[in-house]
Amino acid sequence: MSASASSPPSAASRRWLMGLGLVFMTGVALVLFFLLTLATDHRALEAGGYTSLVWLNVGVAAVLALVLLWLSIRLASRWRRKRFGSRLLVKLAAIFALVGCLPGLLIYLVSYQFVSRSIETWFDVRVETALSAGLNLGRTTLDTLAADLSGKTRAAAVGLGGVGDLAAALALEGLREQLQASDVILWSSAGQAIATAGESRFNLVPERPSATLLRQVRNQRVVAFIEGLEELEALADPREVLALPVRELPRVRVIAAVSPPSFGLGGDVRFLQVTMPLPAALVADALAVQLANREYQERALARDGLRSMYIGTLTLALFLSVFGAVLLAVLLGNQIVRPLLVLAEGMRDVARGDLTPKVALTARDELAGLTRTFAHMTQELLEARQAVQHSIGQVDAARASLQTILDNLTAGVVVLDAQHRVVSANPGATRILRVPLAAHLGEPLSGIPGLESFGQWVQQQFDRFLSDQSHHEGGHWQQSIELHGGQHAQEGQGVTLIARGALLPNGDHLLVFDDVSEIISAQRAQAWGEVARRLAHEIKNPLTPIQLSAERLAMKLEPKLEGADLAVLNKSVKTIVDQVDAMKRLVNEFRDYARLPAASLQPLDLNALVQEIVGLYEAAEVPVRLELQPEAPLVLADPQQVRQVVHNLVQNAQDATPPGAGPVLLRIRVSEGGRWVRLQVLDHGPGFADAILKRAFEPYVTTKPKGTGLGLAVVKKIMDEHGGRVDIGQRQDIDGTRGAQVSLSFRVANLQQG
């Protein structure tokens, strides 16, 4: 998403602007320093320009120092906050500072000594003597030229003393050539030009000497002086004199007094003026020596200032180089550290699990390429994590589905490790084994209370399977086992399990088992029903002829027998008739068991039905006591069959309870979930024997001398028809009362209310 025009600049923009500003300041410093070095070689800039440039350089150095101080404070702050890259920036700044300082300081010291010694050599005594000698030599040469011209001019003036004005005028040209002068003028005593030769003849009014000069000539007879040399002293380069025309060169002018032609007192004194230009080379050399001497004297007077100027320039150069090196270190360090900072930030995000797209620098160096590689790697990790999360989601969904299947399986599923410790178990295993296996995870199966024998048996089966897997088809073993210990023994019921074991790919042991007790019981009930039908069909038909035949024998033989024989006959016939009646009753019970009608389920008030049944036993030798559940919900049941079941159980309880031992207790309770109503019948008898508990619901299993053993079998069959449950066990009350206990569980009629 692009930023708006009014948004503040980014960190990268600020760094770029700061770098641009530092580069600009460094450029300005270099330019100023260059101008400063030029100023040390230009005398015209020494006075004001050099000082201004020095202060400008000092100002720039101060700005760079402030920037450097600000960057140092920022580095110190980053160091204290332990920001990534701070140590590297400090190291880079220190390295660049050392690289700038040590060589710069070394060069500074050497330059300082060199400048100091060089300045001292500039003002050596021999140099000063040579300059003084050169200056004197130039002056002597000029004086010699002037003296020579003065002598020649005086001699010429003497020659013109006896010549009139006209003859003198004619002799001037020859005299000029003789003297090699550029101009010759004969002046009157009043300062009027009488005659000229040379350059002045082209001037209508030649420049005449002053009266003071003429007076001096009368007194000294000859005066010589040099003109035009002062004007050329202002030239910057004396060699420029060589290019000047002759008329602009310095010249020697000599004025000599010419005696009058007659020696009378009234004669006027005339003046001969001779002008000769100085040689250009001589003038140039004289000016050069004079200029060098003047500069030497000026430099000699400003020796300390000159030394300070050069040393100050060197010091500024040292400061600017050091500041520039450190600032360059920070700038380059930022450029080097920035990719590392990007990588560090990205790594911290990855460590936190944040795999969102990372920043990738567009530069062409290796570090920027590393950020691009890291961003590409992070993108691949993100895609891989998304794929893994998708796969994990699928696995979780499959695991949840599998867990749902396991939780709703009626079979028990237990996973054991190689040491037969419980790794996991489903609720079906807890329900079948009557042990909370979830509370015993990590424990050996044989070490769980109540499952010792079962765990040892499972371990033996797996050991056999592992020792010889070739004899087990399908890669698993399957066996059946009956459990009678633990909670099953307390509940008075044993269970028959079909167990199957197999090895998992990770080496764990998979144990799957199912409770087939109900199936076996149903199979047995079905078998007994078939037996009952056959007994009713095969046995009942011959009983009546047997009974009739016995009675007919008695009728035929009674008149013929007396005494002991008659008694034996009656006893034998009575025995046959009684046994036939017993056989008929047995056959009728088997018939009723086989032909038990289907239950007609309807809402039933169990409290009212039990109260009605108990009312029939008020005069019984063993009394019956009730513990009802007030406002117990209606149950789904067949009233006639429930009545038959309760009568059967009450009679069995009375038969098992000795006289005076205590009443038979009928107790009604509602389950915690409100889905079941339980009717319990408890007596004070000896309880169930272990052999009876194992097969209590099978026909013809009884402890009564005259019982058929079909009572509990019929009860079981009726409760199965009702979709309920019947449980038997030993009675163990808190007060120590013992006996037998039979529990009938009925479904509540309105499950929505439960």
Image: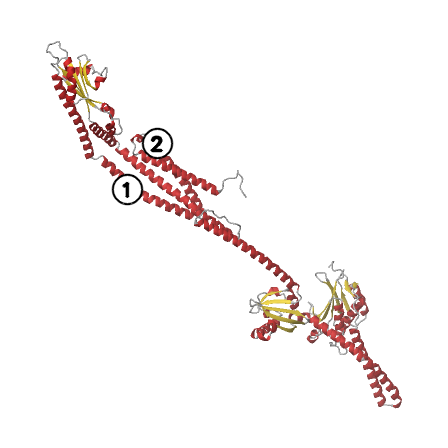
Dot 2, crowdedness within 10 Å: few (<14), some or many (≥20)?
some
Q: Is residue 104 left or right of residue 405?
A: left
Label disc, if present, on residue 52 of the rendered structure: 2
Left or right: where 155 falls relative to 424: left
Label 1 CA crowd tier, 10 Å (few <14, some 14–19, many 20+):
few
Residue in the foreground of this view, choosing between 505 and 247: 247
- If the image is split into quadrants, where does the C terminus sit? bottom right
Residue 110, disc: 1
Instruction: Please tell me which residue is depicted at 44% across the width and 44% down the height of the picture.
Output: 77
Which element carries disc 1, helix, strand or loop? helix
The correct choice, above or below, for 446 with respect to 557 in the image is: above
In the orientation shown, which residue stands out farthest toward the right?
559
- 325 w.r.t. 453: above or below: above
Q: Residue 736: x and y, percent?
A: 69, 69
- Check disc 2 and give the amino acid type: Ser
Instruction: Indicate the position of residue 206 as horizontal and vertical percent values.
Output: 22, 16
**Of the pair 754 and 386, the residue shown nearer to us:** 386
Amino acid type, residue under disc 1 in the picture? Val
> For residue 41, what is the image quadrant?
top left
How far apart are labels 2 and 1 at the CA level?
A: 27 Å
The disc, 2 or 1, on the residue closer to the chain's N-terminal end is 2
Which of the two residues, 351 or 245, is positioned nearer the viewer here? 245
